[in-house]
Image (cartoon, rainbow, N blue to C red):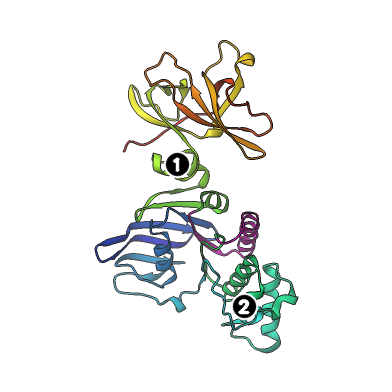
Amino acid sequence: MNALDLYSICKSYGAQTALENISLSVPAGSRTVIVGPSGSGKTTLLRMIAGFEFPDSGRLLLNGQTLVDSTHEVPAHQRLIGYVPQDGALFPHMTVAANIGFGLSTRGSEKQERIAELMDSVALDASMAKRWPHELSGGQQQRVALARALAQQPRLMLLDEPFSALDTGLRAAMRKLVARLLADAGVTTILVTHDQSEALSFADQLAVMRQGRLVQSGHPLDLYRYPDDEQTALFLGDAVVMPARIEAGWAHCDLGRIPVNNHRNNQCAQIMLRPEQLHLVSIQTSPAEAVGCRAVVTERDFSGNTCTLTVELQSRNCAQQPGRSLMVRSSGLYAPPMGSAVHVSMIGHAHVLSEA
């Protein structure tokens, strides 16, 4: 069962197209992440779902109920959709308890018990109930905003880049906390972000937007491994893209003859590998008959447990240009030094990108 269904949503502001024919289904209880560069239309789409804006055309259904079509528009306050903006948008003149309890219909001890329950659910100590928003850290403010949204028992939760203003370590911790909390509550969630790693780690379903269009959606691992085009491949992470000739499930390219996930014959195409699919060993320990090619390490970016290397392939007998540079990920402890000669081999299959 789908919690949310979007059908051919379109929106323009004058001559500027913001959303073009967006169709997407969000399964009940899932976490869907809408990701894309600035200006891709992802926040506009989120505001359409919330009811803050309305499309020019298209249909929007929540749990089978029509929220928007050509004759019907349900206002935001009647949708029972929770919304957490980027800055939390807490009321500065209200305490933590008053912010969380804002809009609760209960009164007296019952309301206080509900507020205490919500504070506990988002890991806020009861002693913080009387604090003011300016006395809280960024992470604490976001948890108060989330508790306030959950207080309404929403049918759908919308998160608009809620972790972007937090420090890196806190951002990861908050992301895990929110994911666990929403999963335990069984709340269907849509997160908007431009952070690729955040999108991949949070999502059950990933939707990539570009220039107002939905270019690809599916399971995060599938989009990471099998992007439709080069732009999507590069947006979701580092990628090695090179031309190749495809023949009977093999690509003939600068790396030699490597397996691919497509069986087109005698056709030139672009293939993609993720840097972690490339494996380096020293020339001295590489067997003479090893599949792959030789290279020299030209750059080294050490980041602790991993090291990102740039290697320049040595000329070989193939149809492609010699001297191509590739990005390779290696263990930070055992990465070869700059200038060392290495043998480059591949793990798994290369992905054949769709034709433009």
Q: Residue 103: x percent and y percent?
A: 56, 82
In reply to whether residue 183 is colored magenta, the answer given is yes
Task: Looking at this view, name the residue that lies furthest to the bottom.
Answer: 108
Mark 2 = which residue?
100
Instruction: Point out the residue furthest to the top here.
Output: 288
Q: Say if the magenta span includes residue 270.
A: no
Q: Secondary structure at mark 1?
A: helix
Cα distance, mark 1 to mark 2?
40 Å
Relative to residue 251, is residue 63 depicted above or below? below
Reply above or below: 296 against 1.
above
Q: Nearer the viewer, residue 203 or 91?
A: 91
> Is 298 displayed left or right of 245 in the figure?
right
Q: Quadrant of residue 14?
A: bottom left
Q: Quadrant of residue 337?
A: top right
Residue 149 figure quarter? bottom right
Secondary structure of residue under mark 2: helix
**Which residue sits at x=60%, y=68%?**
142
Residue type at mark 2 is Ile
Q: Is residue 31 above or below residue 119?
A: above
x then y, percent, for residue 346: 53, 25
Which residues are drawn in magenta? 165-194
- Secondary structure that dominates the magenta span: helix
Relative to the observer, which residue lies in front, 143 or 225? Answer: 143
Give the residue number, with chain letter if any, for mark 1: 234
